[in-house]
Image (cartoon, rainbow, N blue to C red):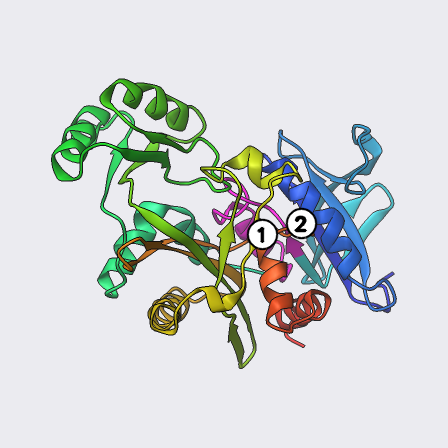
């Protein structure tokens, strides 16, 4: 029987390397979705790609009886459970990185006639691949740091050629990271040629062989905004900058809970710089077709130049993540925002 309240599938975990970030976010997101308005079903996706009904934070392995499968019945989407078919009005795929933001899960949901929050399976792969995003950004007049893409196994775009071009174009120090991962996974600075192979191997080991080599710009501030976009309503929040008591804001520091990172006052960034970043954000949001939520990241160099860094189409959603913090600083209740995204995805 179909529930009288809209049934929402909260997908978390995933096959990718950012599964633990997803689960932390699912615990927080669950608290934002009111039980009196929605029938929420938490669905954990394990490393093998299996779907299971399981509460986030539950450390016990999922039981075989909790396994579910996306399916269609009577033209409506849902999941097959051990008790039969359960209709789903919407899904919130709180999944990051590979098998999360790359269109794979979105395609599965679309095939099962389950509406969902976030980027569709066209935008996801473009935004997730930093090399593709840079090409689009630069075509729109959005400035980016200089970079070279290396592709494993390619004779034309292999590591040796990319290394040589990077050394000739911008030289050391440089920055190496997987082209298709987020949360700073596999990313590191390279201060000299002796460090190159170590950093490249670390990035290549956690990705599908697409590695981005960038100039290491002299960053004064890393600034970010939250995009909230439903129906005819679009909000690009003011820009906050990350303030830290350490160096590179890597994966461990982002999610340890003891990072010391915070969003500084919006007034710390001058109006001219904000205007450039807002214009860049509007161009990217419109052309790429951002759905519901995104976080757009920029670098501000010590010379005052604005450089686009990346778009996260499913930004971190823990209680300490920048996306909900930026919404709150803009006067937007994250719980209200999530409800609006769910209703928009359902077409209500």
Residue 208 seen anywhere in this rendered image of the structure: yes
Q: Residue 318 — which label?
A: 2
Count of marks placed on residues:
2
Q: Residue 333 — which label?
A: none
Q: Nearer the viewer, residue 242 or 200?
A: 242
Instruction: Give percent across and percent down for residue 165.
Output: 14, 34
- Magenta-span inclusion, residue 84: no
Which residue lies under the disc numbered 1? 262
Q: List the single residue furthest toward the left.
A: 168
Sequence-wise first label, 1 or 2: 1
Residue 16 seen anywhere in this rendered image of the structure: no
Give the number of the mark in front: 1 or 2: 1
Instruction: Give percent across and percent down for residue 17.
Output: 55, 33
Q: Residue at x 51, y 67 (%)?
A: 266
Taking the image as shown, residue 270 lies to the left or right of residue 56, namely left
Instruction: Give percent across and percent down for residue 133.
Output: 33, 53
Label 1 residue SS: strand
Picture quarter with the C terminus = bottom right
- Magenta-span inclusion, residue 103: yes
**Residue range (magenta):** 92-115
Q: Residue at x 27, y 62 (%)?
A: 142
């Amino acid at each position: 029987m179909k529930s009288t309240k809209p049934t929402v599938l909260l997908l978390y975990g995933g096959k990718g390397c950012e599964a633990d970030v997803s689960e932390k976010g699912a615990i927080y997101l669950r608290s934002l979705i009111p039980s009196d308005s929605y029938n929420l079903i938490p669905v954990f996706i394990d490393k093998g790609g299996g779907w299971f009904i399981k509460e986030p934070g539950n450390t016990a392995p999922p039981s075989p009886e909790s396994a579910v499968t996306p399916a269609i019945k009577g033209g409506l989407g849902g999941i097959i459970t051990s008790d039969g078919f359960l209709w789903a009005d919407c899904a919130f795929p709180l999944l990051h990185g590979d098998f999360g933001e790359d269109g794979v899960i979105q395609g599965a949901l679309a095939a099962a006639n389950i509406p969902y929050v976030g980027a569709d399976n066209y935008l996801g792969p473009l935004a997730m691949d930093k090399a593709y995003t840079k090409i689009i950004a630069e075509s729109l007049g959005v400035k980016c740091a200089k970079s070279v893409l290396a592709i494993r196994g390619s004779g034309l775009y292999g590591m040796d050629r990319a290394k040589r071009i990077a050394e000739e174009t911008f030289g050391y120090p440089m920055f190496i990271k997987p082209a298709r991962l987020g949360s700073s996974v596999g990313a590191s600075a390279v201060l000299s040629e002796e460090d190159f192979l170590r950093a490249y191997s670390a990035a290549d080991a956690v990705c599908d062989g697409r590695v981005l080599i960038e100039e290491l710009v002299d960053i004064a501030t890393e600034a970010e905004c939250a995009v909230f976009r439903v129906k005819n309503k679009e909000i690009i929040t003011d820009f906050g900058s990350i303030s830290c008591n350490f160096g590179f804001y890597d994966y461990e520091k982002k999610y340890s809970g003891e990072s010391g990172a915070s969003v500084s006052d919006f007034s710390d960034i001058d109006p001219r710089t904000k205007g450039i970043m807002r214009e860049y954000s509007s161009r990217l949001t419109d052309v790429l077709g951002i759905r519901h939520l995104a976080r757009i990241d920029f670098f501000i160099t010590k010379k005052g130049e604005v450089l686009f860094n990346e778009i996260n189409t499913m930004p971190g959603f823990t209680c300490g993540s920048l996306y909900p913090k930026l919404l709150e600083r803009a006067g937007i209740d994250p719980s209200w925002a999530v409800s609006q995204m769910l209703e928009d995805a359902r077409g209500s």
